[in-house]
Image (cartoon, rainbow, N blue to C red):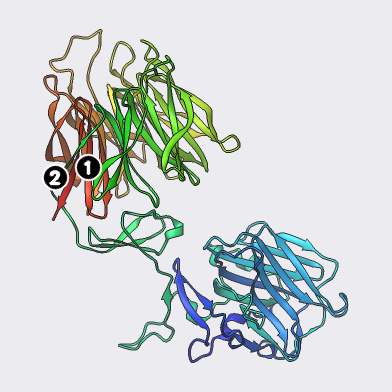
C-alpha cells in the first residue's frame, strides 16, 4: 500500500518536449494529449522503465485514467493503453472502450489455456465530451470500476488476474495496440498504475473528483511555469476552439470555452458554461430608435412571438383578432418579415414557441369559440418535411389569454391562462405535463385564477417559480396576483402581490439582482368611487430580497393601461419598454423605453408613438437589434431598429 504511483503517461513525454504523434489541447480549462494514429510505435516505451527491480506485473493494482471521449461509432473499439510483448501480437494487459462499454483485457497462460480474458463493464457512458476519471481496481477474480466516484461496478470472473505475469521484453503502447486501427481519438490527461492498492479512496477525497489526480505530466499541469522574458513556452498547447458567427447561440456546459463573434456588434464573446462573456467588443450604446418596417397584418394583433427554428430561420407569429383570415407566421427574409403561413385561429391572444427534444411546437391561445361552437386552443408541430406548422393537439380552454412552456427536473410542462367561462372570471387555469409515452400533454395541476392574463415562469438557483397576472374578479381589478413555487411535485403559493388589472409579468436580471415587473392595465372597483382616470396608473417593479425571501417593491412607473413589459440589453446597458395602450381618451399614445440607471432605477429615455400597443418583442439578427410591437387597434404592426453608437 505504500508503493508509489507509476505514471504511464509521463514516460511517453521526453524531457526535451513532446513525442512525435502527440499534441496538447486545452478544453474546459484542462489540458490533455491528443494522439496521432499515423505513428502508434512512437507512443511506446519498454515496461522495464516502470518495473525496475522486478519483471512481473503486480498481482493487485489500480489503474487511474482521466480522459475526454469523443463519440465512438457503433461496433468500434478504441484502446486507452496496451502492454504487449515484442514477439507476440497478443495484448498482455489492456484497456479499451466501445459505445457504452469498457473492456479490461489480460493474458493468462496458466488459467485460460493461453487465451486472452476480457472483463466487460456495460452501460458506461463516456461519449459526452466531458472529462471523466475512472478507477479500475483489480484483485484476483474481482474487478471493480468507479466512474467519477459514483457507485462502484463490481465484476467477478472465473479466471483470476495472473499472479506472475512476465513483462520481459514487453512495452507499453499509449492509445493503441501497436496498430493504426483502434487508436484513441479523445484526450488523455492521466494514466497511472498504482501497485498493491485500490486508488478509489485517494481519488474520491478530492473536491472535483472528475479531474482528481494521482500524477499528471508537467506539460498538462494547470499552472505551467511562466516563460522568462521573451522565452517561448516549453510545451506549446492548442485549444479546442470553435468560433460561431451569426445570432446569439446557446451557452451551456457543452459550449464552454467556445467563442461567438457578433459581426454586427463587432464583439467577441467566450462561453463560461452559462453566459457569454465579452472578450473584445466595441461597447455599443443605444442612440435612437428608427422605424424600420410596417408589417401589415391580417387584422388587429393581440400578441406576437419571435423565434428561431435552427437551420431554417427567424420567424414572427402574430395573434390576430378575426377569423377568417386567422393568424399569420412571417419569416425574416432579406432583412424583412414576409408572409410565410396562415393558420386559422379564433380571436387569438398569444403564441408560445417551445421545443421538447428535437420536436418543435407553437401553441396558440384562442379566446373565442370556433364556427361549430367549440372552444379550444391548439398546439402545432413543425413538420420538417413540409416546412410548415401542422395541427398536433387540441386542448379545451376558456377564454385563453396566454401559454407558458417550461421544464422542471427534465420534465416538460405547458400552462394555459383561462380568462373567463361565460361571465365567470373566477375559474381554474391549468398546467399540463408532457407524457413521453403518448406524446401528448395531460392535465397535471389546476390553479384558481381571476380573469387572468399571463403566466411567467422563472428559476432562481434550484427553485422554480410561476407567477400569474390576475386581472378581474367580476367586481374589481384591485386584486392579488400570485407567485407560486414548485415544491414536492406541484406549485404552491409563495407570495401574493396587490395588482390593478395586471396584464403581464416580466422577470429579468441585472447582474446578480432579480427583478419582477408587473404591467397594471386599469383601476376599477364597483364598490368604490370612480377615479379621475381608470387607466393612468402606476405599474411596479419588484426586486427579490434574499434575506426576506420575498419580492419587495423597488420602483413605481406611471403607465397608461400598460399591457406588456419587455426587457432587453444593448451593450452593457439594460432597458425596459412598456406597452402603453390607452390613456382614457385615445389609443394613440407614447410607449416608453426606460434605461437602467443604477441607483436611480429606471429612467425614461425614449418616447415611441404607438397605436393601441399590445405587445413588444426584442430580437437580434446579424444586421442589428430590433423591437417589434403589435397593435390591438389597427392591422399594422411595426419593426423598429435600435441605432447605436
Q: Closer to the N terminus: mark 1 or mark 2?
A: 2
Q: Which mark is residue 627?
A: 1
Foreground residue among 150 and 447: 447
Instruction: Tell me residue 278's x, y (percent).
Output: 28, 61
- One can see residue 20 in this view: yes
- One can see residue 574 in this view: no
| Element carrying mark 1 | strand
Dividing the picture into quadrants, the one containing residue 592 is top left
Q: Is residue 201 above or below residue 562?
A: below
Instruction: Tell me residue 127's x, y (percent).
Output: 57, 62
Task: Give the CA separation, mark 1 to mark 2.
Answer: 9 Å
Q: Is residue 563 above or below residue 244?
A: above
Q: Which mark is residue 213?
A: none
x 33%, y 22%: residue: 480
Q: Is residue 499 above or below residue 488?
A: above
Foreground residue among 176 and 143: 176
Image quadrant in which the N terminus is located = bottom right
Image quadrant in which the C terminus is located = bottom left
Q: Residues within 10 Å of mark 1 (few under 14, many from 20)?
A: many
Q: Residues within 10 Å of mark 2 (few under 14, many from 20)?
A: some
Assess whether mark 2 and mark 1 are in contact (beta carbons under 8 angstroms): yes
So how many labels did they put on this image? 2
Instruction: Tell me residue 21's x, y (percent).
Output: 53, 84
Residue identified by numbered label 2: 289
x 36%, y 85%: residue: 227
- Left or right of 303? Residue 170 is right
Amino acid at each position: 500500500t505504500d508503493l508509489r504511483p507509476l505514471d504511464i503517461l509521463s514516460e511517453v513525454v521526453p524531457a526535451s518536449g513532446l513525442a512525435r504523434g502527440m499534441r496538447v489541447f486545452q478544453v474546459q480549462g484542462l489540458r490533455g494529449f491528443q494522439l496521432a494514429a499515423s505513428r502508434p510505435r512512437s507512443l511506446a516505451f519498454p515496461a522495464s522503465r516502470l518495473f525496475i527491480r522486478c519483471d512481473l506485473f503486480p498481482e493487485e493494482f489500480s489503474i487511474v485514467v482521466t480522459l475526454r471521449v469523443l463519440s465512438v461509432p457503433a461496433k468500434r473499439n478504441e484502446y486507452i493503453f496496451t502492454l504487449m510483448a515484442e514477439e507476440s501480437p497478443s495484448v498482455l494487459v489492456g484497456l479499451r472502450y466501445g459505445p457504452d462499454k469498457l473492456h479490461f483485457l489480460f493474458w493468462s497462460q496458466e488459467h485460460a489455456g493461453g487465451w486472452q480474458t476480457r472483463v466487460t463493464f456495460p452501460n458506461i457512458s463516456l461519449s459526452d465530451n466531458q472529462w471523466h476519471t475512472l478507477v479500475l481496481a483489480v484483485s484476483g477474480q474481482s474487478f471493480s470500476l468507479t466512474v467519477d466516484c459514483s457507485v462502484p461496478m463490481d465484476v467477478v470472473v472465473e479466471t483470476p488476474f495472473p499472479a506472475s505475469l512476465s513483462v520481459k521484453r514487453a512495452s507499453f503502447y499509449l492509445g493503441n495496440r501497436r496498430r493504426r486501427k483502434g487508436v484513441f481519438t479523445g484526450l488523455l490527461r492521466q494514466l497511472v498504475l498504482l501497485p498493491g492498492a485500490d486508488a478509489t479512496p485517494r481519488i474520491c477525497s478530492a473536491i472535483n473528483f472528475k479531474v482528481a489526480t494521482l500524477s499528471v505530466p508537467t506539460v498538462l499541469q494547470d499552472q505551467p511555469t511562466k516563460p522568462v522574458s521573451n522565452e517561448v513556452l516549453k510545451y506549446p498547447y492548442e485549444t479546442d476552439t470553435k468560433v460561431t458567427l451569426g445570432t446569439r447561440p446557446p451557452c451551456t456546459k457543452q459550449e464552454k470555452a467556445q467563442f461567438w463573434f457578433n459581426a454586427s456588434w463587432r464583439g467577441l464573446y467566450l462561453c463560461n458554461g452559462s453566459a457569454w462573456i465579452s472578450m473584445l467588443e466595441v461597447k455599443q450604446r443605444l442612440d435612437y430608435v428608427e422605424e424600420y418596417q410596417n408589417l401589415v397584418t391580417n387584422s388587429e394583433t393581440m400578441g406576437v412571438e419571435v423565434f428561431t427554428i435552427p437551420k431554417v430561420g427567424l420567424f414572427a407569429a402574430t395573434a390576430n383578432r378575426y377569423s377568417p383570415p386567422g393568424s399569420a407566421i412571417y419569416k425574416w427574409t432579406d432583412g424583412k418579415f414576409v408572409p410565410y403561413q396562415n393558420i386559422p385561429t379564433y380571436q387569438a391572444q398569444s403564441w408560445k414557441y417551445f421545443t421538447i427534444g428535437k420536436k418543435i411546437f407553437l401553441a396558440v391561445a384562442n379566446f373565442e369559440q370556433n364556427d361549430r361552437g367549440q372552444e379550444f386552443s391548439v398546439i402545432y408541430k413543425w413538420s420538417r418535411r413540409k416546412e410548415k406548422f401542422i395541427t398536433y393537439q387540441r386542448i379545451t380552454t376558456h377564454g385563453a389569454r396566454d401559454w407558458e412552456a417550461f421544464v422542471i427536473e427534465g420534465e416538460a410542462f405547458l400552462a394555459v391562462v383561462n380568462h373567463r367561462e361565460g361571465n365567470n372570471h373566477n375559474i381554474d387555469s391549468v398546467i399540463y405535463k408532457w407524457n413521453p409515452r403518448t406524446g401528448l400533454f395531460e392535465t397535471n395541476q389546476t390553479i384558481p385564477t381571476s380573469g387572468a392574463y399571463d403566466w411567467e415562469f422563472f428559476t432562481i438557483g434550484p427553485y422554480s417559480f410561476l407567477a400569474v397576472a390576475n386581472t378581474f374578479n367580476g367586481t374589481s381589478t384591485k386584486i392579488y396576483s400570485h407567485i407560486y413555487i414548485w415544491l414536492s411535485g406541484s406549485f404552491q403559493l409563495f407570495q401574493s402581490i396587490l395588482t390593478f388589472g395586471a396584464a403581464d409579468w416580466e422577470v429579468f436580471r441585472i447582474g446578480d439582482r432579480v427583478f419582477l415587473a408587473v404591467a397594471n392595465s386599469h383601476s376599477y372597483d364597483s364598490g368604490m368611487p370612480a377615479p379621475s382616470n381608470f387607466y393612468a396608473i402606476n405599474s411596479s417593479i419588484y426586486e427579490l430580497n434574499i434575506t426576506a425571501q420575498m419580492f419587495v417593491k423597488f420602483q413605481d412607473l406611471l403607465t397608461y393601461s400598460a399591457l406588456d413589459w419587455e426587457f432587453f440589453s444593448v451593450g452593457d446597458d439594460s432597458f425596459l419598454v412598456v406597452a402603453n395602450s390607452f390613456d382614457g381618451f385615445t389609443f394613440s399614445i407614447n410607449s416608453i423605453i426606460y434605461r437602467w440607471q443604477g441607483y436611480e432605477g429606471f429612467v425614461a429615455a425614449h418616447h415611441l408613438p404607438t397605436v393601441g400597443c399590445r405587445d413588444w418583442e426584442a430580437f437580434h439578427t446579424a444586421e442589428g437589434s430590433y423591437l417589434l410591437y403589435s397593435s390591438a387597434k389597427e392591422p399594422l404592426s411595426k419593426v423598429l431598429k435600435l441605432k447605436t453608437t
